[in-house]
Image: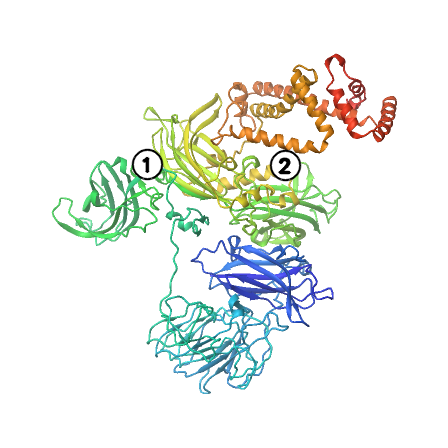
Amino acid sequence: MKLVVEVINAHDLMPKDGEGSASPFVEVDFENQMSRTRTVPKNLNPTWNQKLVFNLDATKPYHRQTIEVSVYNERRLNPGRNFLGRVRIPCSNIVKEGEEVYQIFPLEKKWFLSPVKGEIGLKIYIASESNSKPKPLSPVFLSEQEKLPPSIPPQEQESTTSNLLPPQSIPSGLTDTTLEAGPCEELPAFETPKASTVEAEVESVAVPDYSAAETRSSSIDIDQEPKKESREPVLEIIQQLDKHQVLQPQIISIKRRPQGTPSTMHSVDPQVQSSHHENYNHNDTNQQPRISIKRRPQAQGTPFTVHSADHHPQVHQSYNQNDTNLQPRISIKRRPQGPGTPSPMRSFNPQVRANHDETFNLTGNNPQQPRILVERQPQNTPLTTHRVSPQVPTRNNENYNFSDADTNSQLGERWPSDGAYGRRGWVSGSDRLSSTYDLVEQMFYLYVRVVKAKNLPPSTITSRCDPYVEVKLGNYKGRTKHFDRKLNPEWNQVFAFSKDRIQSSVLEVFVKDKAMLGRDDYLGRVVFDLNEVPTRVPPDSPLAPQWYRLEDWREEGKVRGDIMLAVWMGTQADEAFTDAWHSDAATVYGEGVFNIRSKVYMSPKLWYLRVNVIEAQDVIPSDRNRLPEVFVKAQVGCQVLTTKICPTRTTNPFWNEDLVFVASEPFEEHLTITVEDRLHPSKDEVLGKISLPMTLFEKRLDHRPVHSRWFNLEKFGFGMIEGDRRNELKFSSRIHMRVCLEGGYHVLDESTLYTSDQRPTARQLWKQPIGILEVGILGAQGLLPMKMRDGRGSTDAYCVAKYGQKWVRTRTFLDTFSPKWNEQYTWEVYDPCTVITLGVFDNCHLGGGEKEKAPGGTTARDSRIGKVRIRLSTLEANRIYTNSHPLLVLHPHGVKKMGELQLAVRFTALSLANIVHIYGQPLLPKMHYLHPFTVNQIDNLRYQAMNIVAARLGRAEPPLRKEVVEYMLDVDSHMWSMRRSKANFFRIMSLFSGLITMGKWFSDVCLWKNHVTSVLVHILFLILIWYPELILPTVFLYMFLIGLWNYRFRPRHPPHMDTKLSWAEAVHPDELDEEFDTFPTSRSQDVVRMRYDRIRTVAGRIQTVVGDIATQGERFQSLLSWRDPRATSLFVVFSFCAAVVLYATPFRVVALVTGLYSLRHPKFRSKLPSVPSNFFKRLPARTDSLL
C-alpha cells in the first residue's frame, strides 16, 4: 500500500525574507519517511500540485500514526530555512483512492510564540501498489475553473510541476532509446534481447540538503554493448528519506551472487534525482553519494520492471568516480539471468533497517561510513532485501544472517470493533473474532461444517445422483440443499446444536440421494462420538475440515464416496455462529431461515446535495405571444423540490435559490432538473429537462464557494417531424447552477434530542474516538404473547440495537417468552453525549418472506415489543451495568409493560482529557452553524433521510424491515399528540418549580414567618453589602456544596422509560386514539369534528397566554414612547431624579436601603399593591388596535 499526499497550494503565508514575501516549500514526515516539494520563490500564495508517495504497511496498525506536514521558507542568501507552520493529520481519517477531497487546513504553531498564519490545501489518500503511480493533477482554483467554456465540465489541467526535461542529446554510454517518465510515474515492464551482456552503472546524488539554495539532482548512466539494443527508463525521484539519513551518511555496496539466482529487490528508494541529459566526469570531486548498478547478461524475453520512481527537478552536475565524500554509496551489480526470469526492482532505499537475525558483510575504508556488501546466492534462490537501519553500531567484517526477517507479530486481546482501538493497538473489523465475550454468558454449541463430497455413486436405476446431507443429533435433524446430477457437490454449510438440548452422545452425518418418488436412498454415513469432539474458542484458528470415508448405514463396512467435514464444540463467539442452521429453529423453512439469523448492518453514507439554481437563458414557451412564468423543479429519487416562480416574466429568469436533498452512496439516483412554465394553477408546461449523475458534482468539506456551471436543457418536440423521428431531441435553453455534495454536515436521520452520531459525512473531518461502548444483550423475561399459533399465544423475539451507523440484530428465538440471546457487540464512541437505542420485536416472517399475510389479510409486519434508550453520558467509565429495563409500549387502549430486557453495558474511556475537551465543543459540525438550515428544512431532510435508510436496510439479507427502522428512528415523533403536549407542559412547570419554591421562601422571609431565618438572612445581606466581592464566590460555593450533597443521591442505574413523565398513565382513551390515527385521518367526521373543537380550545388558552406576554412587553415599551403623555412625563421626571440621587449616593447605601425595604417587617407593609405595580398596569398596550 502507498500513502499519497498531494500538496496542492497554500494561502496567506507569513513573509520571512525581509522583503514582504517568502520562498516556501513543504516537507512531509510519515513514519520516519520524509519527502519534500520544490521551492516556489517569492510567493505567499504558492501552488505546488505535487504528489509525495510513502510506503504504508497495511499489515500493521497505522491508525494511531500521524502525518506531519510542515511549511518552510528557504533562505537564499544565508542557506537555511524558516518555519512557516505545520499540520498534523491523524491517519485514522485517511480515505481510499477515489474518495479523496481537497481540504484546507489552517497552519498551526510549533510553539506558543511562533509567528504563524495561513492555510494549506491537501489531498491525502491510500492507494494500492498498482494504482500508486501519480496522474496529472488539476489545481483547485475558482479563477481557472470559471474560465472554462459553458456547458463543458472543467477538465484536469496539466501539472505545473511535471519537471520533464526536453529531449537532449544522449551521451555516450547511454542506451540507444531513452524513455521519459512523468512525475512520480511508474513505468511498465519492458524486455531486453536474449543473451544480452549489458552492464548498467547508475550514479546518484547524495542525500539532498534541504537547506541548500537549489535542489541537486542526478542521472542514470547505462553502459551497453553496441550490438544489442535495450530500452531503459529515465526516472526522476521525489526526495524521500528517513530522518536518520540526514544525520548519518553511509555507503552500501551490493555485489554479485552465484549465477542464476532470481533477484527481487523490495523497499529500496535512493534519494536520487536521475536524468539522462547529465554528464559525468570520472575525476569529479563532487561530494555526493554514488550508486553504481551493473547489469548482468539477460535472456531474451526477460522482463525488467522498475516500480515507484518519483519525480524531481534536475540540475546539471558532474560527479567523480574517486569521490571521497562521506555520503551514501550504493553499488549494485547484476548477475546473469536465465530465460524468463523476472527481475523487478522496486523503490530501492539505502536507509534500510537491520534486524537481529540478518547477516551483512560490512566493509569500508572509512569507519564513519558503514559499507554493506550483499553477495550472490545460489541459482534460482529468490533474493529479498529488507529494511536495515544504518544507525545501528557496525564494525568491519561483522556477519549477519540476511535470509530471515522477524515479522514482529503483535499478540494480545483486541477489541471486536471495525477500526477500534484495542489494548495493544488499532484493529480492523476482520479482527472482530478475536474478542472475548466477557459481558455475556457463554453458550456452547456443537458445530458441524459440511463442506463437500466427492466420488459419490450414481443410482443404479436412474444413473444420476441428487445428493444432500442430513445431520442428525438425537431428535434434531438438519439438512443441506440438494444438487441435481452432481457426483462432487459442494455445500459449505454449518449446523449448530445447542449443548443444553443435546439428547445423544453420537452425531450422525448421512449422505442421501433425493428420489423422485418414494424414500430417499442412503449413500453412506459418518458417525462421531461427542466425547471425542474438540473444543475451539476464538481467537483460535478455525478447525480444518477433513475427508471421511462414507460407511454403510447398516454398518456393513465402507462404501464408495468421501465427505469433507469439520466438527467442533464452540461458543456464540465463533465466526460460524451467525450463518449457522440452529437446532432450536428447525421448524423454520424457506426464506424464513435467513430471517432468524443475527446480522450487523451499516447505514448508507448520506450526503446533503445542495442545488443552487441561479438563472436560465433562452427559455422559449410554446406560445411565442406571451412571456413565460418560469420555475425550476428538481428531483432526486422520490424527493421533489421547486423554486419560486420568477417574479418578472422574461425569457431569461433569475432565481438564486437553494434546494437541498439527501443522497446516499452508492449514488444510484440522478438529479433531474426541469424548467417549467406555469400556464394556470392546474397546468404546467415543460420547457426543458436534463438528468445529471451524482458523480458529476464536487464534494466540499467547508464553506468555500463551488464553481458554477451552465447546463444545456433538452426537450422532446412533437408534431413537427414524421413519426419515426418524433422523439428526436432538440436544443431548448440552458440553465446556470451551482451543485455540490456537502460533506461538512451531519445528515440527521434521528432526532437531535437522542441522536447516536454527530460526525460529519466526510471521513476526513472525523475526530479520534474517545471511547468504546460494549453492549451484551443477555435476554428478555416475561414477554407477552404477540400472536396465536396452534391455538395458543406465541412470541418469536429478536432484539435490534442502533448506535451511529452500525445496526445489530440478534438471532430470533422461536416460541419462547424468555429468550436468551447472550450476544455482545461493540461500537466506537466519538461523543459521550449520545444515545444508544435498543428495541425488541416479534418476528412475523418465518415461513416464506414478503408474501406472508397477517390474520386480517394485510402484509405481515414485525410487532413492537418495546424500546430502551441509554445515554452514554449517564454511564460511569469502565463500569459494567447489568440491569433489566422495562419494555413499555403505548397501545390504543393504554400503556402496557411487555416484559423486561436484560442488558450488560460497559463504556470504556480511552482518554479522559479528550472527553473533557468534547464537552466544550459544538454539538454538531461547524457547517450547521456557519450555514444553518431552517427548521422546516431540517424536518423535511430528516424525513427523507429516514426513508433512504429504511429502504437501504430493507434490501439487506436478512432485511431490516421498514417498520423496525421507523420505530428505532422515531419517525412519528413530530406528529401531534395531546398526551405529549401535556407531558411537555408539565416538564416546563417542573423546571420553574425551583424558582417558584425560591420565591415562596423569600416571601416567607419577608413576612417574618420564621423569625430565626429572617434574622439570619438580614445578617447575610449586611455581610454581602459590606463585602460585595464575596457575592459571586458565595454563590459558586453554595452550588458546590449542593453538588456534593446530591452526590449521595446520584442515580446508580441508567434511566429507563418513565410512564409518569410521559403522561401515559392517566391519558384519555380518545387522546390515544387520536395519537394512533393515520395522517391524513381515517376517522369519521363526527370524531374529527370533536377533536378539532378540542384542539381549538387548547389553542385558545395558549393564545391567551401568548397575548398576555405580549401585553406586558408593550407596556414596558410605552414607558418612553409618549403614547400616554402623562405616564411618560412622570417616568422621565422620576428617571432624572433617580439619576441625580444615584450619582450622589454610594452604591452600597442604595443597595442597603433597597434590601432593608424589601425585607421590612409585615407591620410596615400594606396589603394593597405597590405604587410601581399600579403605575405599570396603567400603561397602555397595543391590544386596543387588535380586531
Q: Secondary structure at mark 2?
A: helix
In the displayed image of the protein, which residue is found farthest to the left?
556
Observer able to see residue 155: no
Q: For the residue marked with disc 2, what is the amino acid?
A: Asn
Chain-order first, disc 2 or disc 1: 1
Q: Residue tagged by mark 2?
A: 936
Query: Which amino acid, by three-letter code, is at mark 1?
Result: Val
Crowding at label 1, few (<14), some or many (≥20) Cα neighbours within 10 Å?
A: some
The colouring scheme, among rainbow, by chain, secondary structure or one colour, is: rainbow
Distance, label 2 to label 1, CA atoms, is 46 Å
Relative horizontal placement of residue 680, taking residue 1055 as reference (left or right): right
| 1085 sits to left or right of 435 | right
Q: From the viewer's perspective, is residue 1162 above or below residue 160?
A: above
In this rendering, is residue 1157 above or below 475? above
> In the image, what residue occupies the spot 32% across and 51% down?
541
| The quarter of the displayed image where residue 395 is located | bottom left
Residue 591 screen position, x and y as percent: 36, 40
Q: Nearer the viewer, residue 698 or 10?
A: 10
Q: Position of residue 537 (x, y in %)?
A: 31, 46
Residue at which label 1 appears: 588
Quarter holding residue 287? bottom right
